[in-house]
Amino acid sequence: MKIVFLQTGKTSEKHIAEGVENYFLRLEKNPGLEIITVPDIRNTANLTKEEIRKKEGGKILGKIYGTDYVVLLDERGREFRTVEFASWLENRLMQAERRLLFVSGGAWGFSEQVYARADMKISLSKMTFPHQLVRLIFLEQLYRALSIIKGSPYHHE
């Protein structure tokens, strides 16, 4: 099964972009991993938050296949300890879906249409993080979970 990380907009903060690149390079050793970036919505000054979410949502939905298992990174989602996430991920990777798609939304979150399409929501913390920082935190946790699955000594517990 292929793992896809879909993010909204480029990572503009240099220190976060460097961290994302670092973990992506580590994760590249895992066949079937892909990062897709949905372009930012432009000219948003006259748009409401809901209009921005709908436009971003349309772009996100355009990247989702019917057979994808879609997991939103959302503050209202299920929380895991890292080893629990690794176990969940290992089980999910054995499923028949073509892609396991993790989605990080924009600054205003997801549209109702994206929520309706999601199979699951995962929360990285009860705290709120900037959407660009979520990318780095998630990619590190994905790397850590895959390391646990492989029996690598990266995770200490």
Image (tube, rainbow, N blue to C red):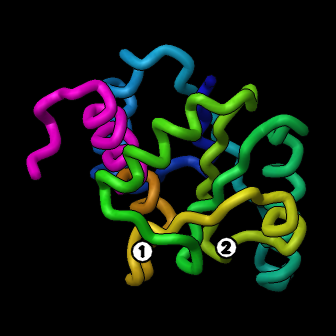
Q: Are dots 1 and 2 in contact, CB under 8 Å?
A: no
Taking the spot 77% from the left edge, 78% from the top edge, the residue there is: 45
Secondary-structure class at tag 1 = loop
Residue 99 as seen in the image, left or right of residue 35:
right
Residue 73 falls in image quadrant: bottom right
Q: Which residues are magenta?
A: 137-157
The one of 72 and 69 positioned closer to us in this rendering: 69
Amino acid type shown at disc 1: Phe
Residue 86 location (% of width, % of height): 38, 45
First reached walking from the N terminus: tag 1 or tag 2? 2
Examine the structure image and report whether residue 1 is included in the region drawn in magenta. no
Q: Is residue 17 visible?
A: no
Q: Which residue is mark 2?
A: 109
Q: Which residue is mark 1?
A: 129
In the image, is residue 9 above or below residue 67? Answer: below
Taking the spot 58% from the left edge, 29% from the top edge, the residue there is: 94
Classify the position of the N terminus by image quarter: top right
